[in-house]
Amino acid sequence: MRVLVVEDDPNLRQSLVEALRREGYLISEAGDGNAALEVLGGQDVELVLLDRDLPGLDGDAVCRTLMALRHPARVLMLTAAGTLADRVAGLDLGADDYLAKPFAFTELLARMRALTRRQETRPAPVVTVGDLTIDTARRLVERGGRPVRVTSKEFGVLACLAQADGGFVTVDDLLEEVWEDPYERTRGVVKVVVYGLRRKLGQPDLIDSVAGHGYRLAAS
């Protein structure tokens, strides 16, 4: 697995690079946002450890660019700004996870493993439900041949529902699978994400909900 470490502090970047290499990861590195995009354009990177507070082209801009390009790499955002509002903002940009500095290296590894497991356990790269197509490898969604742009959380929920093969997925299972931070795991946040998905996917509605059972995808 190739990991791109994007950090402007040379000492921290070098420490991360050396420690991750000892763990067996293939590592590329960049000290600013422009250099990061160059690496991502030329190498097969699967995970980006992205400092949010980069000089020049900051981490937010890099994350937005990856979303716009529909780049398949997962993003773990690292930043000294660790309030709930900061975490929500980072995730809304398209980051898959968010870790506040200073952090324990063991926690960083655990979050990286969690993101990797999600990639490895996906049963099929492309799932089709009616006229809805979900490319889980490239993280692309289309309905009726029309691209649908979704957030990281919306994609996570949609992928879980698609892989259930028509079965119901409970709210608790969605929270466990899609939301890393336990402080963000509330039933209300699932309702908000599902509402956003329904609005973006359009009519007829593909998402069934049954009290006590959860949600499922049903072909139109």
Image (cartoon, rainbow, N blue to C red):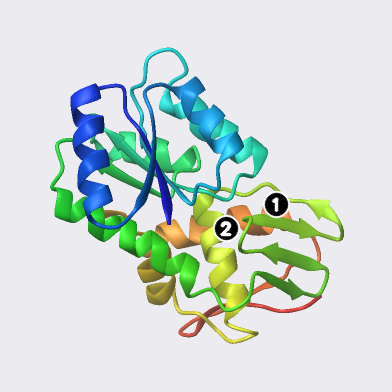
The amino acid type, in three-letter code, at marker 1 is Lys
Of residue 102 and residue 147, the one placed in the foreground of this image is 102
Mark 1 residue element = helix
The amino acid type, in three-letter code, at marker 2 is Phe
Give me the residue at 69% from left, 53% from top: 199
Mark 2 residue element = helix
Give me the residue at 55% from left, 28% from top: 38
Residue 15 in the image: above or below residue 165 = above
Q: Earlier in the sequence, mark 1 or mark 2?
A: 2
Image quarter hosting the C terminus = bottom right
* Whole-percent x, y for residue 96 in the image: 43, 50
Give the image quarter of residue 204. Answer: bottom right
Residue 88 appears in the rendering: yes
The reply, left or right, for residue 47 in relation to residue 106 is right
Image quarter hosting the N terminus = bottom left
* Whole-percent x, y for residue 124 in the image: 63, 76
Decide: few, some or many residues near mark 2? Use Cα within 10 Å; few <14, some 14-19, many ≥20.
Answer: many
Residue 202 appears in the rendering: no
**Which residue position is annotated with label 2?**
155
**Which residue position is annotated with label 1?**
200
* Whole-percent x, y for residue 212 in the image: 45, 84
Decide: few, some or many residues near mark 1? Use Cα within 10 Å; few <14, some 14-19, many ≥20.
Answer: some
Of residue 135 and residue 83, the one placed in the foreground of this image is 135
Q: CA distance from mark 1 to mark 2?
A: 12 Å
Q: Which numbered circle lies on residue 144?
A: none
* Whole-percent x, y for residue 77 in the image: 36, 39
Residue 113 in the image: above or below residue 217 = above
The reply, left or right, for residue 98 in relation to residue 170 is left
